[in-house]
Amino acid sequence: MRNFFSPLLKTSTLKFLGEARRVPGFTWFDTLHGLVYARWPYLYIGIGTGEHPLAQRYGPLVVRITRFFKRRNGRQPVAAGSNGKPRSTFADTYHGKVVPLENARQLVLVNEDVRLPDLEKIIPYQRARAIVLTNPDHIVALECPCRVSRQAPCLPLDVCLIVGEPFASYVIEHHPQRSRWISQQEAVGILEAEDGRGHVHHAFFKDAMLGRFYAICNCCACCCGAMQAQRRGTPMLTSSGFLAHVDADLCLGCGDCNDYCQFEALQLVDHHSQVDEVKCMGCGVCVSHCHQGALSLALQPEKGEPLEIFAMMQAAQRP
C-alpha cells in the first residue's frame, strides 16, 4: 500500500510514515493524526483556541471524532482511581515543558542523535515524553500557529522552532511560505530575542508527533493556546523544575519583574516582589529582567526535574 501511494506523497511524508512504523504501539490513526496536525497546524490550532471561523461549527465534531478513535485504540480516559492508576487526560497527548533560556539553548545546540525514551521524572505525563532527536541540527523557524490565529498577535511571527527529523523537513516542505531553514546559532538568536521580549520557552511534546519532543515554542500568555488552557485548569504545561527566588535585600520594589511574568506569579507586597510558589513555573524570565539582580532560580525538587539535555545525555551513556 505504501509503495502504491509513494509517487503521490512528498519525500518528507514518506519519512514520517517510515518513522511512524518503527514506533511501538503507534497506530494508523496516530499516524494520520500526526500528518494532519503538521500539515494544517493553523487550522488545527485555530480551532483548538476557538479563534478560527470554523471553530464554533466544527470544533465539537472534531473532538467527538478524536474521542471515538481513541476509544477504538484503547485510549479512552479511565475514571480517576478506578484501576489505581493516574487518570489520562487531553494534556497527556499534547503538552509543554517550561525550559529556562539556558536549557532551551542546549536543545538547539545538540550535535549528535539522541535517544531518551522515557522521561517520567522530567515530563510527568502518561504519554508523549520521549526525546528522540535525529539530525538535531535540522531546525526550521515556523510562523507560530497561535500568534497567526490572533487578530492582533505579538510579533515577530516566526518564533516556533521545529527541531530534528522527520519534523523539520515535513514542515518546510508543506509550509514553504511560512517557514525557513535556520542554523543552530540563528535558533539561539531567536530564543534570546524572545527572552528579551519576556516570552517563555516551552519544549513541546505530542503523542501524534511520534510521542516525543518536536518543537520549542516561544510563548506569551496573550497568544499561546497552551498557556491559556493552563489558566483555565487544563494542565498542559509542567514546571521547569525551578522556582524563582527574591532576595529581599536587593529588591527595590520597582515591579518590572511583575510586568514580565507570564504566569502572574509575582506581586508587590510591602514594596518587595513576592513569588506565588504555586503559580511560578520557573521560566526565568523575571530573572533576566531584574536589573538589580534580586531574582534567581533555585531547584525545586517537588516541581519535577529540569530538562537539561546535555546532563541527560551524559547520564544515559554511563554504564
Image (cartoon, grey):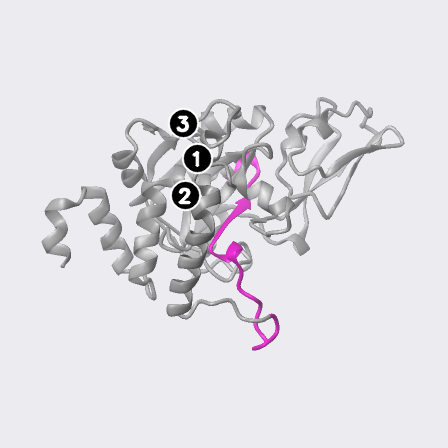
Residue that label 1 marks: 145
Q: Is residue 160 visible?
A: yes
Spatial CA span between label 2 and label 1: 9 Å
Residue 121: x %, y % from top left: 55, 58
**Cβ atoms under marks 3 and 1 closer than 8 Å:** no
Report whether 63 appears left or right of 291. Answer: left
Amino acid type, label 1:
Pro
Helix, strand or loop at label 3? It is helix
Residue 110 shows up from this direction:
no
Whether pointer 2 and pointer 1 mark residues with C-beta atoms closer than 8 Å, the reply is yes
First reached walking from the N terminus: tag 2 or tag 3: 2
Q: What segment is highlighted magenta in the picture? A: 80-103
Q: Residues within 10 Å of mark 1 (few under 14, many from 20)?
A: many
253 lies above or below 34: above
Which residue position holds label 3?
185
CB within 8 Å, label 2 to label 3? no
For marks 2 and 3, give the one nearer the viewer. Answer: 2
Look at mark 2 in the image and give the residue it sits on.
44
Which tag is nearer the camera, tag 3 or tag 1?
A: 1
